[in-house]
Image (tube, grey):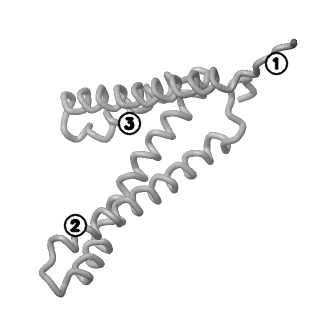
Amino acid sequence: MGHSSADHSRDPCPWVILNDMGAAFAMGAIGGGVWHAVKGAKNSPRGERMAGSVSALKARAPVLGGNFAVWGGLFSTFDCALKGIRHKEDPWNSIISGGLTGSVLAARGGAKAAAISGLVGGSLLALIEGISIAITRFTADRNKPVMPQLQ
């Protein structure tokens, strides 16, 4: 992109989509594995808890990982597209990407469901971006260099 605000610690845009999809799959599969393992053990009769736990984990964790990967891939695709269209990297890209991702994922439910999910997705990303900016400003103020007092 060549802009001063570009984040050079990340991969270039086509590759970041695959990277984010993989990371999202891993988060969903690990988190889903823990969740469904506990749920499987809880819903199994005594003496069968370990088998029920492993069975539920094997059946549901990859599905949840796949759902997370789809969300992460769509979000990153929209984010990269907005960076290319707007020639900016700012919080608005994430907010709009969250809204578009929510809308696309709910599009099968009709226009109303897509609009509501888009608003929820955009609102959640706006909340996340706002908290991120607040934390950055708070920590930046605490780490300002202070000139020592001369006596």
For the residue marked with disc 1, what is the amino acid?
Answer: Pro
Query: What mark, if any, has residue 24 been given in the picture?
Result: none
What label does residue 101 carry, if any?
Answer: 3
Q: Which amino acid does label 3 sit on?
A: Thr
Q: To which quarter of the image does residue 51 belong? A: bottom left
- Residue underneath mark 1: 148
User: Mark 1 or mark 3: which comes first in sequence?
Assistant: 3
Q: Can you tell which quarter of the image residue 106 is in? A: top left
User: How many C-alpha atoms fall within 10 Å of the one at disc 3: few (<14), some, or many (≥20)?
Assistant: many
Q: How many angstroms separate mark 1 from mark 3 (CA)?
A: 50 Å
Q: Can residue 44 be seen in this view?
A: yes
Element on which disc 3 rests? helix
Q: Residue at x 25, y 27 (%)?
A: 115
* Above/below status of 39 relative to 140: below
Helix, strand or loop for disc 1: loop
* Dot placed on the residue nearer the N-terminal end, 2 or 1: 2
Q: Which of marks 3 and 2 is in front?
A: 2
Corner quadrant of residue 28: bottom left
Whether residue 75 is situated above or below residue 5 in the rendered picture: below
Tell me whether circle 2 and circle 1 mark residues in contact (CB < 8 Å).
Answer: no
State the residue at coordinates (58%, 28%): 83
Task: Give the number of the disc on residue 39.
Answer: 2
